[in-house]
Image (cartoon, grey):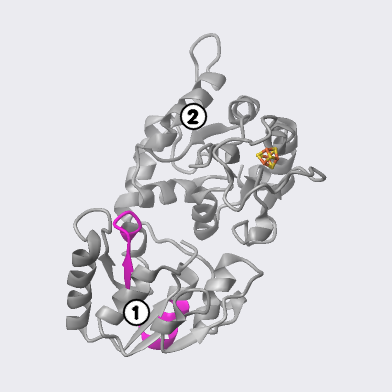
């Protein structure tokens, strides 16, 4: 998702581009106007091993590409461009410069979007992340919402409680949802692995009579359908995880909760008006680049000290609920 501005910049220069990416990411890019064709590279399945890489290299060679931009640091990526015999190979200095014909410095600072755009030597502000769900994706998102009693155009808050890294999961999504549910419907979004967290949110919101103002759609939608759903939300409340970037790409206001990581690492909200929350003055924070599986000190104060009241106030501050009521 954060590569889409680079793709747009390259498409403006050369015309729509072909992209080699994982099978999981392919559907997100195949509808992007900057993309002509997506080539899925299944390094753990069909294309695994050296044989798989060479076979893909042969397929790419047959296309006669003139130029490859290689934002990824991996040796595999660099070797693939070489195997495909692409004459111009442009990569970052911290990748495999020996394999490239042009080497660009990767900026140490700034948002990841801007750092990636440096590969094309493009101005940071010119291109923003974007995703493009199809009408079918929109219909699927609308159907899931209507099944939960949220009619087209009705306001709701999306919450994304998941993260692969346990220490990056804010523990109070349920409490926040039960506060919000008095005012607006709440929809828990995420992948199949987040379904349990989504259920906890629904349980926290269900009243004594079994009435619900929250619904769990984790694992029920594809990535593009999820993007369509997030695009309809008044605001997304999320950890430092992929849905944050989906909301950026869909133009949905964001309140993001950062625990063991910092927005300054380059993966925070980009737009002014979006909010990144974090506990200030905690000596142990940040404790890792990606967030450890669990708090090494056991207290997890970087998340536990961020109360539902603080997050609810931040939502209020965005004005998103008032604006779209
Ligand atoms: S060590 Fe500090 S920053 Fe790291 S998870 Fe624990 S509380 Fe958070």
Q: Is residue 205 left or right of 287 when viewed as pictured? A: left
Q: Name the residue under label 2.
A: 197
Q: Which residue lies at the image location 63% right of the left edge and 25% below the top edge? A: 175
Q: Which residue lies at the image location 52% right of the left edge and 79% below the top edge? A: 93
Residue 49 position, x and y percent, is 24, 61
Q: Which residue lies at the image location 61% right of the left edge and 46% below the top edge? A: 324
Q: In this view, does 89 lie above or below 37?
A: below
Cα distance in 3D space between marks 1 and 2:
39 Å
- Helix, strand or loop at disc 2? helix
C-beta proximity under 8 Å, tags 1 and 2: no
Label 2 Cα neighbours within 10 Å, binned few <14 / some 14-19 / many ≥20: many
Residue 115 position, x and y percent, is 57, 72
Picture disc at residue 178: none
- Whether residue 218 appears in this view of the structure is no
Residue closer to the observer: 318 or 21: 21
Q: Quick one: which residue is furthest to the top in this view?
A: 208
Give the extent of the magenta segment. 8-26
Ligand 1 occupies quarter: top right
């Amino acid at each position: 998702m954060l590569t889409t501005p680079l793709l747009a910049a390259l498409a403006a220069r050369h015309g729509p581009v072909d992209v080699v990416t994982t099978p999981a990411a392919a559907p997100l890019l195949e509808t992007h106007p900057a993309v002509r064709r997506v080539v899925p590279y299944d390094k753990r399945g069909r294309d695994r091993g050296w044989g798989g890489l060479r076979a893909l290299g042969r397929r790419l060679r047959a296309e006669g590409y003139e130029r490859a931009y290689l934002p990824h640091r991996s040796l595999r990526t660099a070797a693939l461009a070489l195997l495909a015999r692409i004459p111009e190979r442009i990569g970052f200095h911290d990748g495999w410069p020996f394999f490239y014909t042009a080497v660009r410095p990767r900026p140490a600072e700034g948002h990841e979007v801007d750092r990636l755009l440096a590969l094309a030597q493009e101005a940071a502000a010119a291109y923003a992340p974007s995703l493009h769900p199809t009408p079918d994706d929109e219909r699927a998102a609308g159907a899931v919402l209507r099944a939960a009693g949220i009619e087209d155009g009705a306001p709701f808050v999306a919450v994304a409680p998941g993260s692969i890294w346990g220490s990056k999961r804010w523990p109070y999504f349920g409490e926040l949802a039960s506060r919000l549910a008095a005012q607006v419907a709440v929809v828990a979004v995420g992948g199949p692995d987040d379904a349990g967290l989504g259920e906890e949110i629904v349980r926290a919101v269900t009243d004594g009579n079994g009435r619900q103002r929250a619904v769990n759609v984790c694992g029920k939608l594809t990535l593009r359908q999820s993007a369509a759903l997030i695009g309809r939300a008044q605001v997304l409340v999320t950890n430092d995880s992929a849905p944050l970037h989906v909301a950026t790409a869909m133009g949905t206001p964001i309140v993001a909760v950062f625990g063991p990581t910092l927005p300054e690492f380059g993966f925070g909200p980009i737009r002014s008006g979006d909010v990144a929350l974090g506990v200030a003055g905690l000596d142990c924070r940040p404790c890792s680049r990606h967030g450890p599986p669990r708090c090494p000190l056991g207290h997890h104060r970087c998340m536990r000290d961020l109360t539902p009241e603080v997050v609810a106030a931040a939502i209020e501050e965005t004005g998103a609920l008032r604006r779209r009521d």
